[in-house]
């Protein structure tokens, strides 16, 4: 890593202790935090601030909140997709199987459909979100289809028939998330497809997140759900902040992942392509994304507020354009 990036990384880590409280709205007590003072003159004692204890002092292993498909065994799904697990359903506050920390979602995976292959026509009981990372192909329904390429996202409702077809000589790589919606949610009946490249930026926050909203409650999800693609400019960091219990926020790094990092509490980890983490639901462990490369990098972010409430600002977001399907009998 170039020396200026190493220095910048060190400075950013130092800043997180000073800025996390503005995001959480809560200051730790002297019992819970560490008082740091600059200056020794008794007449002018300098600046004081409070910072959270380190992960080591809290006894926290942040690996519990992180998933990496590179160390996951591959398995076949839908008669053709080579799938690797990233995160699975489980209790985020209880140690168990590695990556089993999703309170509301079933599984976050990355799949590869080899060149020229196709899957069986399936009808699954859960909701499916997918994002195409690379390659070309088609998402076929029972009577229509959509072209797939990098940047295409789809929301497939439960019991909708579909299959994937790879129409190229390269693998079709897809990020996939499945879950069961609560019975109170009005699900859509048809497949919804959007092209992230034509969507407008509708959300800017946490210092340096520039987001396009892929799917919202109006699209057939829960009232506090949203899925977005978030971009960060070169050499930037998002504002570290903490989340309370039952706020399930996932961050997944899209390729290419050059010099990108995650911050959980007092530790920094390299964030490679398709690595993901759950923002710790402890109210005390902050999280942040870092782009220390010389170009824009992107993440997929998903939010599910669970028991925190029944409404969100996403319910008033403007309508997003979708990709029209083509009839299967047109070819």
Image: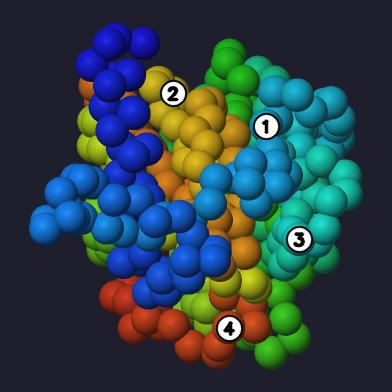
Residue 11 in the image, given as x and y percentages of width and height: 28, 33
Residue on which disc 2 sits: 256
The disc, 3 or 4, on the residue closer to the chain's N-terminal end is 3
- Mark 3 to mark 1 CA distance (whole Å): 19 Å
Tag shown at residue 209: none
Residue on which disc 3 sits: 93
The disc, 4 or 2, on the residue closer to the chain's N-terminal end is 2
Q: Secondary structure at mark 2?
A: loop
Disc 4 or disc 2, which is closer to the eye?
4
Residue on which disc 4 sits: 308
Disc 2 or disc 1, which is closer to the eye?
1
Q: Secondary structure at mark 3?
A: loop
- Quadrant assignment for the N terminus: top left
The disc, 1 or 4, on the residue closer to the chain's N-terminal end is 1
Q: Nearer the viewer, residue 164 or 171?
A: 171
The disc, 3 or 1, on the residue closer to the chain's N-terminal end is 1
């Amino acid at each position: 890593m170039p020396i200026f990036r190493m220095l910048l990384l060190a400075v950013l880590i130092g800043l997180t202790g000073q800025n996390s409280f503005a995001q959480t709205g809560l200051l730790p007590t002297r019992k819970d935090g560490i008082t740091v003072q600059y200056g020794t003159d008794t007449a002018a004692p300098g600046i004081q601030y409070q910072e959270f204890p380190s992960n080591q002092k809290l006894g926290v292993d942040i690996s519990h909140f992180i998933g990496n498909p590179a160390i996951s065994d591959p398995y076949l799904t839908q008669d053709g997709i080579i799938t690797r697990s990233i995160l699975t359903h489980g209790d985020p506050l209880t140690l168990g199987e590695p990556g089993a920390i999703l309170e509301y979602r079933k599984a976050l995976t990355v799949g590869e459909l080899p060149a020229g292959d196709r899957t069986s026509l399936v009808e699954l009981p859960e909701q499916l979100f997918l994002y195409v990372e690379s390659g070309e192909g088609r998402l076929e329904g029972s009577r229509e289809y959509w072209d797939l390429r990098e940047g295409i996202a789809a929301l497939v409702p439960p019991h909708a028939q579909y299959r994937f077809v790879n129409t190229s000589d390269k693998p079709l790589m897809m990020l996939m998330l499945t879950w069961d919606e609560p019975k109170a949610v009005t699900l859509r009946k048809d497949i919804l497809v959007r092209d992230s490249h034509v969507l407008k930026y509708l959300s800017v926050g946490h210092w340096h997140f520039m987001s396009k909203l892929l799917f919202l409650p109006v699209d057939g999800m829960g009232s506090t759900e949203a899925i977005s693609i978030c971009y960060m400019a070169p050499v930037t960091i998002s504002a570290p902040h903490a989340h309370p219990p039952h706020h399930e926020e996932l961050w997944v790094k899209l390729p290419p992942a050059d010099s990108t990092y995650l911050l959980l509490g007092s530790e920094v980890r390299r964030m490679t392509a398709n690595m993901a983490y759950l923002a710790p639901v402890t109210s005390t462990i902050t999280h942040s994304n870092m782009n220390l490369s010389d170009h824009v990098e992107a993440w997929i972010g998903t939010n599910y507020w669970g028991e925190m409430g029944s409404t969100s600002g996403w319910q008033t977001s403007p309508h997003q354009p979708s990709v029209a399907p083509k009839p299967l009998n047109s070819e």
